């Protein structure tokens, strides 16, 4: 039985932050409108959407991720520290006019039904190749990842975690967020990392010459 998610959700637009299902995102909330949003969520179903803002614009991308507030802490200075656990991606249909400080949207989840499936069909060879490239890529960028703990995650969590923390552009991460299937996401991430590695190697060769 498919999970039923709300079709009207409050949205937290944030530039440069791409959030994926089955990952965790810690947030430090201090603006009045988002304090209102989080408090309303805490008093309700604890569900809120994260969407990337478009640069120099009030517009947001069409695809975001629904999250559930899984932990929160109130700070004496008025801030809220929360942890969002990703549930499913959604597609924005339209913005809803309201009298609140924060924005709400009508959304649908049908395109990303795969996010709720427990069976993870994955080509192991492609997955292992991605891990090999990523380890090299992270090492070149001075990024540390506990691969032993990482291997304990489900395949979906592994791919989404790498997509979320990799030192690639926000636009590339958005592209990965919008990629429907896990296999396609794996192939796309692999190509992106390969491009960065090739580009960096080419730059190093030019410097040496």
Image (cartoon, rainbow, N blue to C red):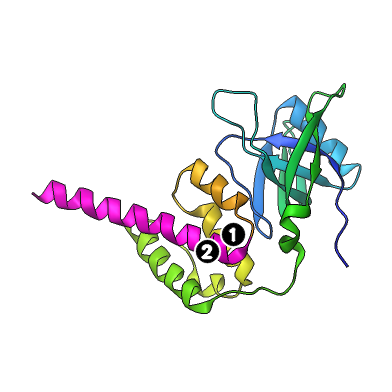
Q: Residue at x 60, y 71 (%)?
A: 155
Give the foreground label among 2 and 1.
2
- Which residue does the image show at 59% across and 45% down from the upper left? 18
Q: Please provide percent x and percent y for residue 118.
A: 74, 72
Marks 2 and 1, how far apart at CA:
9 Å
C-beta proximity under 8 Å, tags 2 and 1? no
Q: Where 39 falls versus 73 (above or below)?
A: above
On the rendered structure, is 25 left or right of 167? right
User: Does the magenta segment cover residue 203?
Assistant: yes
Q: Residue 132 location in percent, x, y? A: 40, 71
Q: Residue furthest right?
A: 44
The magenta segment is 181-209
Q: Please say if 106 is above or below 179.
A: above
Q: Residue at x 71, y 36 (%)?
A: 12
* Image mark count: 2
Location of the N terminus by quadrant is bottom right
Inspect the magenta stretch and tell me whether residue 71 lies in it.
no
Q: Report the magenta stretch's main SS.
A: helix
- Can residue 131 be seen here? The reply is yes
| x and y, in percent, of residue 193 in the image | 40, 57
Mark 1 lies on residue? 160
Secondary element type, mark 1: helix
Q: Earlier in the sequence, mark 2 or mark 1?
A: 1
Q: Can residue 143 be seen at all in this image of the molecule? A: no
Category of crowding for the residue at label 1, using alpha-carbon neighbours closer than 10 angstroms: few (below 14), some (14–19), many (at least 20): many
Residue under pointer 2: 186
- When asked about the image quadrant of residue 60, the answer is top right
In this orientation, which residue lies closer to the viewer: 81 or 64? 64
Q: Is residue 207 left or right of residue 184?
A: left
């Amino acid at each position: 039985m498919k999970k039923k998610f709300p079709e009207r959700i409050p949205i937290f637009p944030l530039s440069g932050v791409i959030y994926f299902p089955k990952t965790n995102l810690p947030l430090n909330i201090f603006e009045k409108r988002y304090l209102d949003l989080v408090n309303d969520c805490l008093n309700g179903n604890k569900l809120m959407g994260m969407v990337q803002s478009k640069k120099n614009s009030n517009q947001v991308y069409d695809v975001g991720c629904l999250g559930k507030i899984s932990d929160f802490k109130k700070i004496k200075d008025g801030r809220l520290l929360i942890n969002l656990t990703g549930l499913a991606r959604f597609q924005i249909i339209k913005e809803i006019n309201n009298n609140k400080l924060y924005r709400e949207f009508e959304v649908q989840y049908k395109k990303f039904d795969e996010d709720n499936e427990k069976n993870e069909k994955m080509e192991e060879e492609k997955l292992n190749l991605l891990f090999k490239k990523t380890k090299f890529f992270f090492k070149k960028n001075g990024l540390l990842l506990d691969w032993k703990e990482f291997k304990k995650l489900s395949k979906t969590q592994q791919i989404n975690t790498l997509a979320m923390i990799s030192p690639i552009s926000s636009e590339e991460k958005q592209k990965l967020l919008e990629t429907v299937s896990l296999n396609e996401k794996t192939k796309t991430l692999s190509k992106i990392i390969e491009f960065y590695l090739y580009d960096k190697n080419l730059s190093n060769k030019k410097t040496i010459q």
